[in-house]
Image: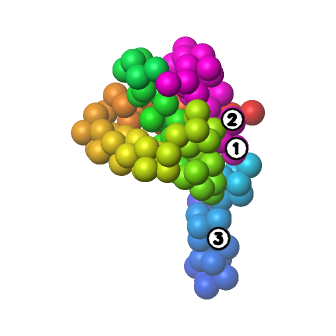
Amino acid sequence: MSSTSISIELAQAVLANVIYNPKKRQVTPERIARVVSDYYGVPMEALQGQKRDRAIVVPRQIAMYLMREETDVSLLRIGAELGGRDHSTVLHACDKINRETAANDELRREIAAVRELIYAD
């Protein structure tokens, strides 16, 4: 264990890495969609399509949620990436996944696993 004394400069340097995560900027909505598609075994066409089967809707909502959390793109761009959906649909999906992760440990683990795959390279 090092005995570096804590200074304002050290604290700023550490917090800069927490507040500004350069990895976050490198992730694209396309990459997130591809990783979610692979993880859940749902073809990209289905994620971007109009079907509303639960097996497709949940991964699609997770993709929207992760795009919003892990990128700085607009709700419109997220909706466009996933089949031209409205920004309110994206908001609804993000709110729903947020609520469900609070109560569902398995879903929280799945999202963490997908997040790891997004940043793996």
How far apart marks 2 and 3 lie (CA) works out to 25 Å
Rendered view: 70 above or below 64: below
Rendered view: 25 above or below 82: below
Q: Which of 61 and 45 is in front in this view?
A: 45
Question: Within 10 angstroms of label 2, few (less than 14), some, or many (20 or more) residues?
Answer: some
Q: In the visual, does 66 lie left or right of 25?
A: left
Q: Most extreme residue toward the left, as rendered?
A: 103
Say which residue appears at 24% left-offset and 39% top-offset: 103
Dot label at residue 31? 2
Identify the amino acid type marked 3. Ala
Q: Is mark 2 on a helix, strand or loop?
A: helix
Residue 74 can be seen in this image: yes
Which is in the foreground here, disc 2 or disc 3?
2
Q: To which residue does mark 1 refer?
A: 28
Q: To which residue does mark 3 refer?
A: 16
How far apart marks 3 and 1 lie (CA) works out to 22 Å
Q: At which x and y percent is residue 106?
A: 34, 28
Say which residue appears at 38% left-offset and 36% top-offset: 108
Identify the amino acid type marked 2. Arg
